Image: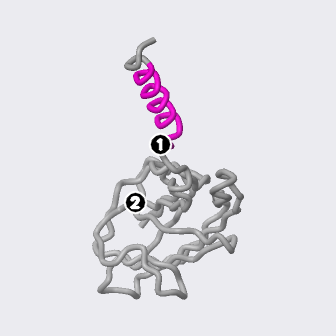
Amino acid sequence: MTKSGYLAILYLVLFITVVSCTQERNPCLEPTRYFLKLKTLKPADTGSAGVDSSLPGAIIGLVDTNVLFVDSVSANTFSGTLSSIADSVRWFIWPEKSNPANGDTITLYYERKLNFLSTACGYNYVYALTNIATTNNSIDSARIETAEVNSKTDALHVKVFY
């Protein structure tokens, strides 16, 4: 074999070594904190379906904290967090920033389940909603649509009827 043949084999082995040792993506960079999605609706004659209803200038956050999920936004779909150290969380919802007297609280009860990611990344929590309690200043009712709060970003978890 000639000198150029040996060089070609050496380059090929070096190329294969570099390509096989390259990691495409760090699995620990995947999102590990999951959010509950809530949608506001007006009751309809069709049962649990409802009609989309945007809150005109909603403020939504955690009760007894200064954490806000939404501040003066007109929308009908909102996302927020659940606690990894408690089995319930209370959110406040002011449908209109200008009228906090119409505000309500929603208490979400859930079970926390440890979810193993990998040896390098450790664990995170997934949640299973079990119950909802609301005040009724503006809220008519609320219901659980999808109990599992996990990595599925397209799931709707709670419907709130005004």
- Dividing the picture into quadrants, the one containing residue 133 is bottom right
| Nearer to us in this view, 116 or 48 | 116
Identify which residue is drawn at 51% across, 59% down.
158
Q: Taking 24 as reference, is 102 above or below it?
A: below
Question: How far apart are the two marked residues, 2 and 1, measured between alpha carbons?
Answer: 43 Å
| Nearer to us in this view, 25 or 54 | 25
Residue 41: assigned label: 2
Give the extent of the magenta segment. Answer: 6-24
Is residue 8 one of those drawn in magenta? yes
Q: Position of residue 48 (x, y in %)?
A: 49, 51
Q: Which residue is mark 1?
A: 24
Name the dominant secondary structure of the magenta segment. Answer: helix
**Left or right relative to 131: residue 17:** left
Is residue 156 one of those drawn in magenta? no
Dot 2 or dot 1: first in sequence order is 1
Residue 80: assigned label: none
**Left or right relative to 59: residue 84:** right
Identify which residue is drawn at 52% across, 50% down.
26
**Left or right relative to 35: residue 68:** left
Q: Are marks 2 and 1 in contact (CB under 8 Å)?
A: no
Foreground disc of the pair 2, 1:
1
The amino acid type found where label 2 is placed reads Leu
Identify which residue is drawn at 38% across, 86% down.
100
Q: Position of residue 21 (x, y in %)?
A: 53, 39
Quadrant of the image containing the C terminus: bottom left
Rate crowding at label 2 as few (under 14), some (14 to 19) or many (20 or more) other CA atoms within 10 Å.
many
Identify which residue is drawn at 47% across, 37% down.
18
Instruction: Kindly state the secondary structure of the residue where label 1 is placed.
Output: loop
- Dividing the picture into quadrants, the one containing residue 144 is bottom right
Q: Position of residue 151 (x, y in %)?
A: 54, 51
